[in-house]
Amino acid sequence: MPPPGGYEAIKYKRNLPVRGVGGAVVFSTVAAICAFGFWRVGKGNVEKRELKREQAWSRINLVPLLLAEQDRDAYRRQQAALAREKEIMKDYPGWEVNGAVIAFERNPSNIWKEAFADISGDPTGRKEYI
Amino acid sequence: MASHRPAVLTDQPYTDPNPLPSSVPHVDELGVTSAPLKSASFFIGQHCKEVNEDFMLCKQENRDPAHCLSEGRKVTRCAADVIGKIKESCLAEFDAHWQCLEKNNQYFQACRKPEKALNQCVFTKLNLTKKIPGSPEGHSQIHEKSSPIFTRVQK
């Protein structure tokens, strides 16, 4: 038999009290933070580009004077090397200071042709040269 | 003698064994290290624009080091002139800026405060301004930005 007043109601309803901020708020906050971050990254990229430009122009402005100094040194070394060569080779008649490194008496492009001509006995060297 | 090299006598002043030929007029080299050069670079670029361009056009003509010696001397004299003038009129600001560059891996962005003082001084005394060609129109140039994102690595 049921107790007097009947049974108490069955507790079937969910009991989920709302706690904290809502989903929409969380979502939009995250979105806002991300948006701010990307905006800042974008600004940073622009700034990086300008810093590079500044760096490049700083160097461009210095190129002529660095090059001028380098040129003077290169010229000095060149002249010193020529003077040394002249001094070393002074007893060698017919020596050309600052001449070609390899002195070919013949045309170097004909050297194989001449070699074949020697072997084959054909002065034109055509047969083997094909 | 243990070496084939001639002895270096430290008690006597150094003499260059291979000096420039006397046909080339003498010019004092700048003798400035990288940080002061970088600090003064934009002022050198502005003040010496003509001689620099003349020299570079000459170099474009011929890369031989003997070809552009006279133009090169003008370039060096002009740069020495600018650096001398900056040292004369803005020594404290100049020193502060290049020493800051020296301590910060020569990053311009790390030394905006001393740079601002230097730019201000050089503008009032020598009438030279730092201009970066190709900067976007309508925006302040990178060294004049009020709140830059990239400053020093360590605050």
Image (cartoon, helix red, strand yellow):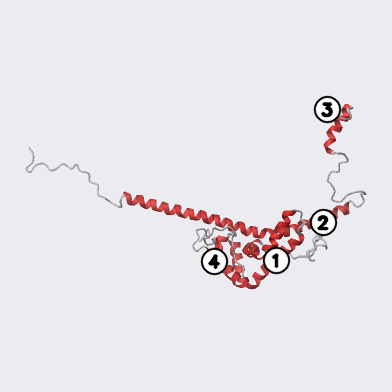
Which residue occupies the foreground of this view, B108 or A105?
A105
Q: Are marks 4 and 2 in contact (CB under 8 Å)?
A: no
Q: On what subunit does the disc labeled 3 rest? A: A
> Is residue B107 rendered to the left or right of residue B22?
left
Q: Is residue A53 visible?
A: yes
Q: Is residue B2 visible?
A: no
Characterize the local packing of mark 4: few (<14), some (14-19) or many (20 or more) Cα atoms within 10 angstroms: few
Label 3 vs label 4, nearer the camera = 3
Mark 2 Cα shell of 10 Å, populated few (<14), some (14-19), many (≥20) = some
At mark 3, the secondary structure is: helix
x then y, percent, for residue B111: 56, 63
Residue B113 numbered tag: 4
The answer to whether tags 2 and 3 share a subunit is yes
Mark 3 and mark 1: Cα distance apart in space? 65 Å
**What residue is drawn where x is 56% and y is 67%?**
B116
**Looking at the picture, how far across and down is residue A21, in whole percent?**
31, 52
Observer-side mark, 1 or 4, equals 1
Q: Which residue is mark 3?
A: A128
Residue B145 coordinates in the image, percent (x, y): 51, 62
Kind of element beneath mark 1: helix
Look at label 1 and name its amino acid. Answer: Cys
Separation of residues labelled 1 and 4 (CA atoms): 27 Å
4 and 2 marks on the same chain: no
- Write down the residue under mark 1: B78
